[in-house]
Amino acid sequence: MREVEKQKEVFLSICGQHDYDLLTGMEAMTQTDFERITYITMALGYTSYTQELIGEYLDLACKEAERADREFDILQDYSAYYEDEQVYEQREKWLTDFISQVPPAKQNDIHQLIKENTEII
């Protein structure tokens, strides 16, 4: 089994029903959903799966890249932008909410995996 397939299988087995429905096409993916899910997959270290999601949702990925470019420009002159806009708090909430939906027996493992891949939690 390829790495991307392993990461996808694990992610779909631990995510909440809403994310599962989004990722299996049962519900439409919004820009915010895409940003949140790809942030979580990267925090888990699932880079192969993240790349697959970018390819699958290329239009959303392009909009996300444009937003990131704008934020980069803003941060050049306004270093407190993320703090003032509560970006860090939002991302921490995404991770906390995600972990709370993971089956209890796997929560500690997922928390540790996220801790290894990010400094937010």
Image (spheres, rainbow, N blue to C red):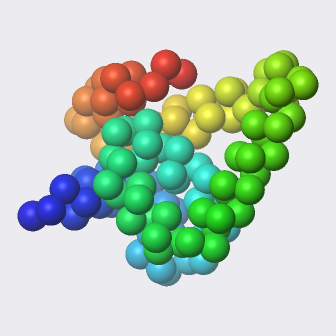
Q: Is residue 62 visible?
A: yes
**With respect to residue 78, does 53 lie above or below?**
below
- Residue lying furthest left in this view? 1
Q: Residue 110 location, x and y as percent?
A: 32, 33
Q: Which residue does the image show at 43% across and 42% down from the upper left?
A: 42
The answer to which quarter of the image holds residue 64 is: bottom right
Judge from the rendering whether residue 54 lies leftward or rightward of residue 111; answer left or right. right
Q: Residue 114 location, x and y as percent?
A: 38, 30
Judge from the rendering whether residue 86 lies leftward or rightward of residue 37; answer left or right. right
Q: How many marks?
A: 0
**With respect to residue 44, does 21 lie above or below?**
below
- Residue lying furthest right in this view? 77
* Front position in the image: 24 or 80: 80
Q: Which residue does the image show at 32% across and 54% down from the upper left?
A: 48
Judge from the rendering whether residue 32 lies leftward or rightward of residue 75; answer left or right. left
* Front position in the image: 92 or 38: 38
**With respect to residue 67, does 56 lie above or below?**
below
The answer to which quarter of the image holds residue 99 is: top left
Judge from the rendering whether residue 55 lies leftward or rightward of residue 94; answer left or right. left
* Front position in the image: 36 or 105: 36
Q: Which residue does the image show at 15% across and 62% down from the upper left?
A: 2
Q: Which residue does the image show at 25% across and 60% down from the upper left?
A: 4
Q: Which quadrant is home to the N terminus?
A: bottom left
Q: Residue 119 location, x and y as percent?
A: 49, 19
Q: Residue 15 location, x and y as percent?
A: 39, 53
Q: Is residue 20 visible?
A: no
